[in-house]
Amino acid sequence: MQHLKLDDVMNMERRKRATLINYLSGFKSANLIGTKNSTGQLNVAVFNSVVHIGANPPYFGFILRPVNVPRHTYQYINETGYYTINHIHKSFYQAAHQTSAKYDTDVSEFEAVGITPEFRGDFFAPYVAESHIQMGLELKEIHRIECNGTFLIIGKILEIWLPDNSVTMDGHIDLSQQGTVAIGGLDTYYEAHKLNRLEYARLQKNA
């Protein structure tokens, strides 16, 4: 097997090193985060770092890169306190990926890439109409990670929108049936296929 030590990794060309490390964490979630600032400017951006923080109450987190350059997602969430998380599906993953381009502040990524903003009820931030699984969140905490200057953004889920009959009696969602995709690295998209659903693991008693 190939063996890479820290010095080997740090001596790699910058882009190669970033690509390698991003792949090492395995398949990651593929989501679009929708925001709106106080003047009504819309923003939507692709993220591969959304993680479950807790279920009681429901909290999700995501990692945001250092803000030494404009980060519209960070600015709008910090300003208004609300945002949406929307699954990316195989029907629009190419448009979703294009939101990672560095658009000017006065350009809405929704309009630039052809994704449809959707407002539901009185929720402040825009959802992605093309997404089958949508969540509206309220900002709860921002933690600066000192070792590299990134931020962990933690939000409380206020509402969830799902297709009819997509949730089983025990809360299971078949993500492959919904067309949710995964990301490898920063730019490779994978279609998911369910292998199996296993029972809750318990210690086996000796016979």
Image: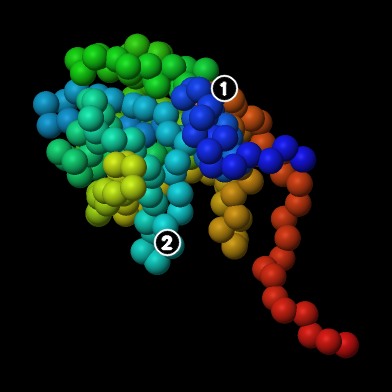
Q: Nearer the viewer, residue 168 or 13?
A: 13
Q: Please state which amino acid type lies under the numbered disc 2.
A: Gly
Indicate whether 129 appears above or below 108: below
Instruction: Please say if 109 is above or below 6.
Output: above
Q: Which mark is residue 153?
A: none
* Within-10-Å neighbours for mark 1: few <14, some 14–19, many 20+: few
Q: Residues within 10 Å of mark 2 (few under 14, many from 20)?
A: few
Q: Is residue 99 visible?
A: yes
* Residue toward you, 12 or 116: 12
Q: Position of residue 64 (x, y in %)?
A: 34, 38
Place of residue 121 in the rendered image (x, y in percent of width and height, measured from the top left):
27, 39
**Picture quarter with the N terminus:** top right
Residue depth check, mark 2 versus mark 1: number of the one nearer the observer: 2
Tell me the residue at 40%/21% (across/down). 100
Q: How is the image coloured?
A: rainbow
Amino acid type at mark 1: Ser
Residue furthest bottom in the image = 207
Q: Which residue is under mark 1? A: 91
Q: What residue did someone put label 2 on?
A: 54
Q: Secondary structure at mark 1?
A: loop
Circle 2: element type = strand
Residue lying farthest left?
A: 39
* Residue 183 visible in the displayed image: no
Along the line of sight, which residue is nearer the eye, 7 or 112?
A: 7
Left or right: residue 162 versus residue 120 is right
Question: Would you say the residues marked 2 and 1 are in contact, meaning their CB atoms lie under 8 Å apart?
Answer: no
Identify the residue at image location x=45%, y=54%.
52
Q: Is residue 69 above or below residue 26?
A: above
- Within the image, what quadrant is residue 55 found in? bottom left
Q: Quadrant of the C terminus?
A: bottom right
